[in-house]
Image (cartoon, helix red, strand yellow):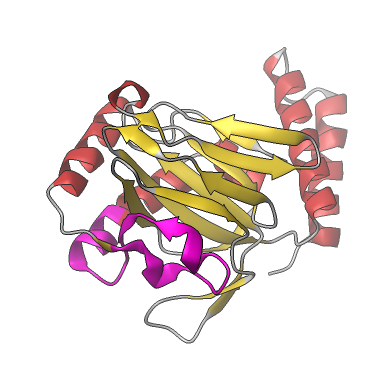
């Protein structure tokens, strides 16, 4: 399931992060590449091992925590500290699959990557190319979103970043372990939650149908969730 989440950051927040990132030192992005992805990865990166990277990552985490749409789609149990990447002219990231397990920097904790996310921070009119291309069972998706918008997709998906031919593409990216490991169960819960919210939005949130469906959602989450 690929989910587009508009407005994770306000336009002002996206501009502020973008400006701070432009003034920050960037390192070779291969530092987080795996065995297969390393040879096809050419970009720049800021990680959570720098003071600025940690501070900017906290901005992203607070925005995610405040987003009901993100919480509904991801049902996050653990979120990897957000990273930031930059693609200048000629840079790209070939087709790859994200590592199944990540070690959280500075801790002994490991995280299973159920979901991957890209939060766009550059105005899409400011650069050419740089589309995120995701392949799943429903076909090939080319994603290039407005600054402040995010795309969420299964980490098992094959994906790549097309070469940038003008300007610079700056994004935040991160992984998360969901409380619900099964992709099918997670998708069903997301669709059920969306349906409940849509029905509730048409009238009384205490309508018996809304109450029953809400109860069903939480009981399924109890059955399928891991804490």
Residues in magenta? 28-56
Q: Residue furthest top?
A: 202
Left or right of 145 on screen, residue 44: left
Q: Quadrant of the N terminus?
A: top right
175 is higher (above) or lower (below) than 137: below
77 is higher (above) or lower (below) than 183: below
Whether the magenta-drawn stretch holds residue 102 is answered as no
> At which x and y percent is residue 88?
28, 43
Q: Residue furthest left?
A: 23
Name the residue nearer the viewer: 165 or 141.
Answer: 165
Name the residue nearer the viewer: 208 or 70.
Answer: 70
Whether the magenta-drawn stretch holds residue 51 is answered as yes
156 is higher (above) or lower (below) than 89: below
> At which x and y percent is residue 191?
78, 34
Q: Quadrant of the C terminus?
A: bottom right
Please name the residue shown 23% across and 32% down the image. 15
Please name the residue shown 62% across and 55% down the image. 115
Please name the residue shown 85% across and 35% down the image. 213
Q: Quadrant of residue 58?
A: bottom left
Please name the residue shown 48% across and 40% down the image. 162
């Amino acid at each position: 399931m690929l989910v587009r989440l508009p407005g994770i950051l306000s336009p002002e927040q996206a501009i502020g992060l973008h400006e701070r990132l432009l003034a920050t030192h960037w390192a070779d992005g291969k530092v987080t590449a795996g065995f297969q992805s390393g040879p096809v990865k050419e970009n720049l990166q800021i990680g959570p091992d720098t003071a600025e990277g940690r501070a900017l990552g906290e901005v992203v985490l607070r925005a995610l925590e405040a987003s009901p749409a993100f919480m509904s789609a991801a049902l996050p149990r653990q979120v990897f500290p957000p990273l930031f990447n930059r693609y200048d002219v000629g840079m790209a990231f070939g087709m790859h699959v994200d590592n199944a397990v990540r070690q959280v920097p500075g801790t002994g904790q490991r995280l299973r990557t159920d979901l991957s996310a890209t939060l766009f921070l550059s105005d899409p009119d400011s650069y050419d190319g740089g589309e995120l291309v995701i392949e799943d069972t429903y076909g090939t998706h080319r994603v290039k979103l407005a600054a402040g918008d995010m795309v969420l997709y299964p980490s098992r998906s094959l994906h790549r970043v097309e070469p940038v031919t003008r300007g610079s593409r700056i994004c935040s990216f991160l992984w998360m372990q969901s409380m619900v490991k099964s992709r099918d169960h997670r998708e069903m819960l997301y669709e059920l939650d969306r349906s409940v919210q849509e029905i509730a939005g048409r009238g009384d949130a205490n309508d018996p149908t809304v109450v029953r469906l809400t109860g069903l959602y939480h009981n399924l989450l109890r059955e399928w969730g891991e804490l």
